[in-house]
Amino acid sequence: MRSKFELIFIGVTIAITLVFFVVIGSMFLIPTFDGFINALFSEEMAFAVSLTLFTSLISATVIMICCIPMAYTLARYEFPLKRLFKIIIDLPMAFPEIVVGIALLMFLGSNGIGDYLEILGIELVFNTTGVIIAQFFVALPFAVKTLYSTFNYIDPRYEFVSRSLGYGEIATFYNVTLPLAKKGLFATIIIAIARCIGTFASVLFVGGGILMKTETLAVSMYLNLSTGDIDLSITAGILLVIISFITIAVMEKYAKESYTSSF
Amino acid sequence: MYLEIEDLSVDLGEFHLKNINLNLEKGEYLVLIGPTGSGKSVLLETIIGFYNPTKGTIKLKNKLLNDVPPEVREISIVYQDTVLFPNMDVYDNIAYGAQKKFSKEEVAEKINKIAKKMKIEHILHRNIDTLSGGESQRAALARALIVEPKMILMDEPFSALDVSTQAKLTSLIKNVCKEYKTTCIHVTHNFNDVWNLADRVGVMKDGKIHQLDSTTEVFSRPENNFVADFVGVQNIFEGNIIEISPEVAKIEIGHGTIINSSDIYCITKINKKYKKDITKKKQHDHERIKVLIAIRPENIIFSNEKFESSARNQMKGKILEIIESGPTVLVNVAIDDHIFKGLLTKSSADILSVKKNKEIYISFKSLNVNIISDYERFNQ
């Protein structure tokens, strides 16, 4: 027999989740079947899907390479102005994504270091690199935050014991810390990929939102909505939902399996 | 000396170790006791190299360890909650350090040998989350010992175990450490560990070692009021020396209650220190030498009548409280403004028919009245 407390909490959870499901699911009912199929197999949609997946995977990889040492540093080491560094890293999570986009555009464009980079033959805005940079800046703070909690949760005495048994810092990190952080690492990968796939405003600014050049799924939704092509726009939205759902479901299942098999 | 720690200080922001001096012979077993937060674990983790000293030196076999990383020090550590790696089974946990030092064949051979000794052969391929507390602790000990460390540090290794497992592991550790001639520092809150394992005891508080001595010395001759209280002396009174000879000191603890002490060690020290002034001090009450005296409750004898005995201290009081604790009874007796605490067995309590408000005599030998030698610190 469930208590009243339990029933109320379960009820609230189910009700709100159902609202989410209905709102997201209603998008699937908007286009006609023919319109959806035509949009799905259009050249523009194929480009948007491949660009989104390609840039998101590259960004997520770079994010993971950067966020592991960053999160570990913040969790384990003390250094001057550590608190300030933490605030700066967390900052992009607190303000709208558009601010990151404008800041990046200003910094990388001709108002910032753009002219100098141009002399060196490097172009970082209005191209695929720009999309990756925008995704990196938006998703990195979320990844660092998640992995920081994971490292913080691991008892440092596991590392102490490993070192007392003859293993140096790197070997201990590889043999003990990373395996113990496996679940958190998977969660971080999920968050990083999901954030990269869903990044819109900053990608629009830094990538330029150029049709068939820097057109990710999120940008495609916006571009087609502004030109009145509802089928393409909604199809891009549906694909975003499906890709995100599959990413999270697969990663969560894999993370759970590898976690339970190692414990 | 095997381990030499000189003037060691560690600053961890909110916590400090202050001027620790500690020497250990090879094969010696030191037990550290002290209240929670006294710095025992920090001291162990500084010896092993997880914290850097701000001052002082740590030498092992004459080699300065201050800047040597933990992986090179060859010192193992065992924690209360074992800290076995959850992503490895028991075998891999034990093999973890050994495979760094020995060949694969040697590791297998050594694991078999130590598993037999620790009686864990049957659990070698079990996941660590299926182990009982005792099995986990045996595995953790095996993991620490297999690498043949120069020293082993144990941080409350038995605290989470039941009494019978504790007893088994205590005798196991004793035998294994003797056999491997391992030098040990063992942190505990359990006085049984002290009596069963220690060659010497260190009593810590607020990042300092307050007394480092043999078990008997620490328990019978605490150096200050904190140590006396911590090791369970229970009867600690402040008083003034009103008369002193080379053998006996008469100490007034207030309202005419006078206690005789034959603590020769401290009496000699006091006589030496106040040789010139002692007579003068006797003349002026406000200048008398203040001391602390400590009497263990088990040294107090109860009787219903006054009796002739060699005990120089005999007093009459009223029973204030009777506290039963397992097979013993703690009896609090009020004498003037002071409460003396004595221990009786249940059958003795029945024979004496102790009850609240009953008048009773207490006696104790002057030899069992310890003068706390650190009384100057107390007086400041």
Image (cartoon, coloured by chain):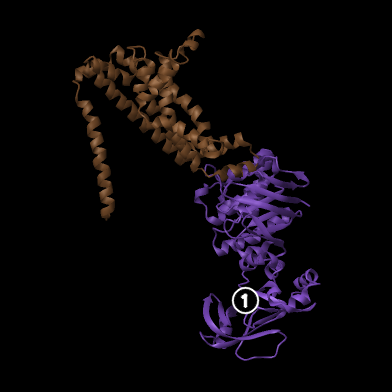
Q: Is residue B151 visible?
A: yes
Q: Is residue B2 above or below residue B287?
A: above
Count of picture labels? 1
Answer few, some or many: residues within 10 Å of disc 1's Cα (few below 14, many 20 plus, some between 14 and 19): many
- How far across and how far down the image is residue A199, in percent? 36, 24
Residue found at x 64% / y 80% = B300
Residue situated in front as seen by the camera: B166 or A231 = A231
Q: Which chain is purple?
A: B
Residue found at x 39% / y 17% = A206
- How far across and how far down the image is residue B90, in percent? 57, 47
Q: Is residue B190 above or below residue A34?
A: below
- How far across and how far down the image is residue B198, in percent? 69, 61
User: Which chain letter goes with mark 1?
Assistant: B
Q: What is the three-letter code of the residue carrying label 1? A: Pro
Q: Which chain is brown?
A: A
Q: Is residue B268 left or right of residue A184?
A: right
Q: Quadrant of the N terminus of chain A?
A: bottom left
Q: Is residue A225 above or below residue B170?
A: above
Residue situated in front as seen by the camera: B16 or A254 = B16
Quarter occupied by residue A214: top left
Q: On the image, numbered disc 1 is attached to which residue?
A: B297
- How far across and how far down the image is residue B199, in percent? 72, 61
**Judging from the image, what secondary structure is the residue with disc 1 in?**
helix
Q: Is residue B352 visible?
A: no
Residue found at x 59% / y 80% = B344
Q: Is residue A158 left or right of residue B196?
A: left
Residue found at x 63% / y 63% = B193
Residue situated in front as seen by the camera: A238 or B217 = B217
Q: Is residue A216 left or right of residue B81?
A: left
Quarter occupied by residue B329: bottom right
